[in-house]
Image (tube, rainbow, N blue to C red):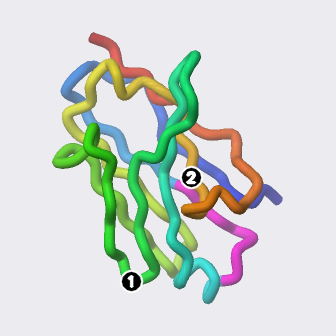
Amino acid sequence: QAHLVESGGDLVQAGGSLRLSCKAPRMITSTFNSATMAWYRQAPGKQRELVASTTGGRTATYAEFVKGRFTISRDPSRKTIYLQMNSLKPEDTAVYYCNGINGELPWGQGTQVTVAS
């Protein structure tokens, strides 16, 4: 069983929305509840970058390039974090991953988001 399973990516038009999910089935619930979890993305030819994070206390932090457009949330009962992405732009095209804030878990396969202009 994978440590992290991302889903929800798709091909959308600019201005559209998507909701990504990331399940952490192998995390102990108490660990998940206290962990700062994050979404990252990696575009072709670029390094992986931090998109958003949420602490155990549900304080959210966002990269400047997604502020006001993306919302991170978490559901402890499902050991899942979400990324609601609105007003998508072509430059948001990337593979999206989740992990702890320090990337301490084995990376999942990611989920592809493609935004067409």
Answer few, some or many: residues within 10 Å of disc 1's Cα (few below 14, many 20 plus, some between 14 and 19): few
**Looking at the magenta stretch, what is its main secondary structure?**
loop
Q: Residue sitting at 70 percent across and 82 percent down?
A: 28
Disc 1 marks which amino acid?
A: Gly
Q: What x and y, as percent, mark residue 11?
A: 42, 22
95 within the magenta span: no
Seen in the image, is 83 located left or right of residue 85?
right
- In the displayed image of the protein, which residue is found farthest to the top? 117
Q: Which residue is mark 1?
A: 57
- Figure quadrant of residue 7: top right
Task: Please tell me how crowded label 2 is: few (under 14), some (14-19), or many (20+) other residues with Cα within 10 Å.
Answer: many
Residue under the point 52% across and 80% down? 77
For residue 70, above or below residue 56: above
Q: Residue at x 55, y 76 (%)?
A: 35
Disc 1, disc 2: CB below 8 Å? no
In front: 106, or 26? 106
Relative to residue 27, is residue 7 depicted above or below?
above
Which callout, 1 or 2, points at the residue further toward the start of the chain? 1
Quadrant location of the N terminus in the rendered image: bottom right
Q: How many angstroms separate mark 1 from mark 2 (CA)?
A: 18 Å
Where is residue 108 drawn, in percent x and y? 70, 47
Relative to 95, say whether 54 is above or below.
below
Query: Residue 85, percent across and down?
Result: 30, 43
Residue 54's quadrant in the figure?
Answer: bottom left
Q: Is residue 61 above or below residue 93?
A: below
The C terminus lies in which quarter of the figure?
top left
Magenta residues?
22-28
Q: Amino acid at mark 2?
A: Cys
State the mark number for residue 96: none
**SS assignment at label 1:** loop
Element class at badge 2: strand
Q: Which residue is mark 2?
A: 98
